[in-house]
Image (cartoon, rainbow, N blue to C red):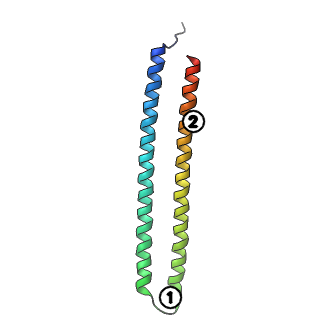
Amino acid sequence: MGRTASAASLATDLELARKQNKRLRTELDQLLKQSLLHLGQLSNQSLVKRVDELTKANQPGDQRRLLADDNQQLGRRAIELEDGLTAASASFHNVMRQINTTSTSDDASRSCDA
């Protein structure tokens, strides 16, 4: 009635799981790098463009005050984006730790079951 897995079968399952974990980690790394790169490009392009506009305008009076306000808003937005990148990086590291912990505890429980 009850069938138990052979040691060879368990070893094969373990190896397949390790390969899948490695592939998933690599894919996660690539996706995170692409996301961070894309976000950085978008934020840098828009900020550089806006700073150039403000520099060219450099007009007196009310418009100068408005441009200064815009510049402050852009500075705050840059800080927000940096905070977002920091949070994404921390999240990525937490996910990797979780994957590694799960992988390690799965390996340990399988070795205890054998």
Dot 1 falls on a residue whose secondary structure is helix
* Quadrant that contains the C terminus: top right
State the mark number for residue 9: none
Q: Quadrant of residue 52?
A: bottom left
Q: Quadrant of residue 79?
A: bottom right
Q: Is residue 22 above or below residue 88?
A: above
State the mark number for residue 101: 2
- Which one is closest to the eye, mark 2 or mark 1? 2
Q: Amino acid at mark 1?
A: Arg
| Rendered residue at 48%/14% (across/down) | 7
Dot 2 falls on a residue whose secondary structure is helix
Q: Quadrant of residue 108?
A: top right
Q: Is residue 102 above or below residue 32?
A: above
Q: Amino acid at mark 2?
A: Thr
Q: Is residue 62 above or below residue 26?
A: below
Give the class, few, some or many, for how many residues have Cα within 10 Å of label 1's Cα (few <14, many ≥20).
Answer: some
Residue placed under numbered mark 1 in the picture: 64
* Quadrant that contains the N terminus: top right
Q: Position of residue 91 (x, y in %)?
A: 55, 49
For the residues labelled 2 and 1, say whether their Cβ atoms are less than 8 Å apart: no
| Rendered residue at 51%/93% (across/down) | 61
Q: Position of residue 106 (x, y in %)?
A: 55, 28
